[in-house]
Image (cartoon, rainbow, N blue to C red):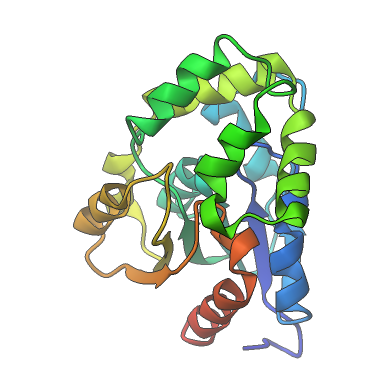
Amino acid sequence: MRRNGCAPILVLLPGMDGTGSLFLPLIDQLGLTFDIRVVRYPATEALGYEALERLVISSLPKGEAFMLLGESFSGPIAISIAAAQPPGLTGLILCSTFAVSPRPAITALWRLAKTVSPRRAPIAVLDYLLLGRYSSKALCSALASAVSQLSPAAFSARMRAIHTVNVLPKLKSISTPVLYLQATEDRLVPSSSCALIQRELPAIRVVSVAAPHCLLQAAPVEAALALRTYAEQL
């Protein structure tokens, strides 16, 4: 897997919280397999997909080969960037994500976002939607900590972005191999979201993992194995 003795670069784009802190379980499992670069989003700025995509592009490795992983909220950003075929991109990984707004769960969250600050959002609701029966004290605490860092303006802007997003037309422009990590017990993103992507990208490899929406956090061992296998086949 190593090229010229160097670990392949893996750029991680975070979920709704944007902190990148929730990647720690996965990073621990990957060890030195990859040269991991985590992109973090501003916690207080009301930025939508276009602005965040520009931020990600400015953070991508220059003159080096890399793989791009878009988790949940960041899936559309990863898809859009991959469709533009940036220099150096060798692979795209999508995890618990979508190309078009996943309703009705997102609609319910959108209503919540308009009335409740993320810092006051009932953690029990988030725990149910994002972790389900895979919840633990450590995961729940990490989730609460990550979400609490988001300002109401940033949270609302990201919810608005999800509510209207549609990058399905861009999928056919992707030329790199694509891996989709699908959580079998995702209460937020339905299996139809993966099916829509698969319809546009028939060659996509789908790996189903017994996990909740927070797949990388609840099943880091399985996720790490899937990533290693995928990278070895590039």
Residue 92: image location, x then y, percent: 48, 62
Is 17 above or below relative to 179?
above
Quadrant containing the N terminus is bottom right
Q: Identify the residue at image location x=76%, y=83%.
A: 6
Q: Position of residue 8 (x, y in %)?
A: 67, 77
Question: Does residue 98 lie above or below 176 as drawn?
Answer: above
> On the rendered structure, is 68 left or right of 20?
left
Image position of 18 with respect to 48: above or below: below
Residue drawn at (22%, 54%) of the image: 200
Q: Is residue 87 visible?
A: no
Q: Going 60% across and 42% down the picture, which residue do you hit? A: 127
Drawn side of residue 206 relative to residue 142, left or right: left
Q: Please tell me which residue is depicted at 77% across the width and 21% down the height of the picture.
A: 44
Foreground of the two, 142 or 36: 142
The spot of residue 61 in percent (x, y) is 70, 58
In this rendering, the answer to whether 119 lies above or below 88 is above
